[in-house]
Amino acid sequence: GLVASTKNISTTDFMKGQYTLSGSGNPGAQVVNQGSLTTSKGGYIVLAGERVSNSGTVTTPSGKTILAAGKTVTLQLDNGGLTSVSVNGSVVNALVENQGLISATNGQVYLTAKGQDMLLNTVVNNSGTVEAKGLANRGGEIVLNGGDSGVVSQSGHLLADSQTGQGGKITLEGQNIHLAGGSLTTATGKTGGGEVYVGGGWQGQDSHIKNASKVVMDKAATVDVSATENGNGGTAVLWSDDYTNFRGTVLAKGGAKSGDGGRVETSSHRNLQASGAVDASARAGHGGEWLLDPTDVTIVGAGADTGIDSATADGTDIFTPTASGGQILNSSIVNQLNAGTSVTVKTSGTDTDGETGNITVNANIIKTAGTDAKLTLLADNNISTGDNVSIGATTGKLNLDLLAGNTTNNASISLGKFINISLNGGDLLADAGNSASGVSLTFMNNGKIKGGNVTLNLSRGLGGYAYNVNADNDLTINGSVTGSTGWGAVLGFTAGGKLAMNSPGSISLQANDPGNGGGRVLISGDKGVTLNAAAGTVTLNAAKAATNGVNITSGNGAVSITNMVQDGSNGMTLTNAN
């Protein structure tokens, strides 16, 4: 192997086989390669100093290439081979940069720098090409590590692909990470996608990867962990503790001949701005998963808040969010649902800024193409929608889970005025995020739900004014049910299969909302109707007007009502068509 360094090694350490490079050397000294460095198979090349630059070619087939900048660099050798390199201690103006070509086919490449008080100065910069491709097996490994201070900038190509096996692994870690427009970061594989981690592991929980403070991915930047022929797509993560601006493209597609889509996460513990594109589809299998996991988040439409795009010029602005809260562009979600990718929007934890883990939907989410897909809204606290919002599908089924109170008790799902949820035969589940939490669902006014199977597990109850819940198959409501209507409007519950309301307390449906004239309560289940108030009463308050009132219909099943209190008998109709 080859070691080139501006640092010193003591004679004693060298004789003992302890290869620790230390000392500042001459002020301003740099390690610069502008030529061509090549080892035999399995060899290594180490360029170490306080500033290291490659604008030439470095080739280590099946071996290791290390560019390292820091106070001390320690090499571990075994039988002439390099087993590991550690960089300790930070230095002012540390920099590792690659403007040329580094190739370690079937091997590993590490670009590591530890800078002191670097703020927004670059400590690791790749504007060239780094290859760790797999020719006969899995792709290799590439690591860009900027330590605790400064910026890791990727504007070139990082390639850990395999033309014969599974894609390799690429990790970018540091305080601030920038994937610039035009950059390509790929770990694709013929038999399965690889792994790309930018700023942290899945949900920031991998102790082996340092979590970044801020991650910015520009519009024309691409990350690809797809399977190219067979096998599943891989895993791609963008994570930050403070701010993630995702505007690029992440691909995790399943193989063209077989395999499912992979897993993609674009998240931040605090502020997430997501307007980029994800494709975890599978031509010959099931679509994959896209997870977005900030603290509070609002789903917005184009132009709803200019802060969803922060500046793209170099400098401070790219790491300074211009929108105060987390935002996800609705078209980004729709595009992935159309591709068959399941999308999960999840909020986590209580933030020091007072954010409690709420999800707010202020823009339409309508799936218009592709096969069936699933959208999950999983909130630590509450879920709410704006007025006149539509969620649903016109092509393929959309399965929808609304899960509130994942870590808090007494959470709520609040649906704005004239909400329209129409899932084209997809199933709807409204429930608590975990079994220990309680959750309620409230329609503000004239809302509508229509799904295949509709299941509402609401320990804190269902309520609202002039709302309609319709199921093509079974409709099950577990929890107390209240509702009222007037002025000829309908409060309706219909099921193509069985309809069951199972309340631990009472059921109260009012067709003559005081002061608002008569309305109509419609309860219909083609295969049976059950209204069960275990510890209370079923109160059906019918309007006196002949054209309004309470209608309970069962097309081919029994009508079962327990503990019923009937008010307004002139407006009450019970029908069993069987």
Image (spheres, grey):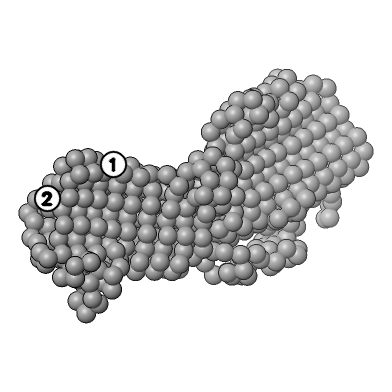
Q: Give the quadrant of residue 11.
A: top right
Q: Position of residue 71 (x, y in %)?
A: 70, 49
Front residue of 388/290: it is 388
Picture quarter with the N terminus: top right
User: Which amino acid lies under the numbered mark 1 shown in the image of this protein?
Assistant: Gly
User: Which amino acid lies under the numbered mark 2 shown in the image of this protein?
Assistant: Ile
Q: Is residue 235 left or right of residue 224?
A: left
- The answer to whether mark 1 and mark 2 are in CB contact below 8 A is no
Q: Is residue 93 above or below residue 455?
A: below
Q: Is residue 408 above or below residue 336?
A: below
Q: Is residue 241 left or right of residue 124?
A: left
Classify mark 1: residues with Cα within 10 Å, few (<14), some (14-19) or many (20+). Answer: many
Picture quarter with the C terminus: top left
Looking at marks 1 and 2 on the same chain, the residue that comes earlier in the sequence is marked by 1
**Label 2 secondary element:** strand
> What residue do we see at 75% from left, 65% from top?
313
Most extreme residue toward the front, as rendered? Answer: 546
Front residue of 279/489: it is 489
**Label 1 secondary element:** loop
Front residue of 402/551: it is 551
Tag on residue 561?
2
Classify mark 2: residues with Cα within 10 Å, few (<14), some (14-19) or many (20+). Answer: some
Q: Is residue 160 left or right of residue 262?
A: right
Q: Is residue 532 above or below residue 547?
A: above
Q: Position of residue 282 (x, y in %)?
A: 59, 34
Q: Is residue 331 left or right of residue 377?
A: right
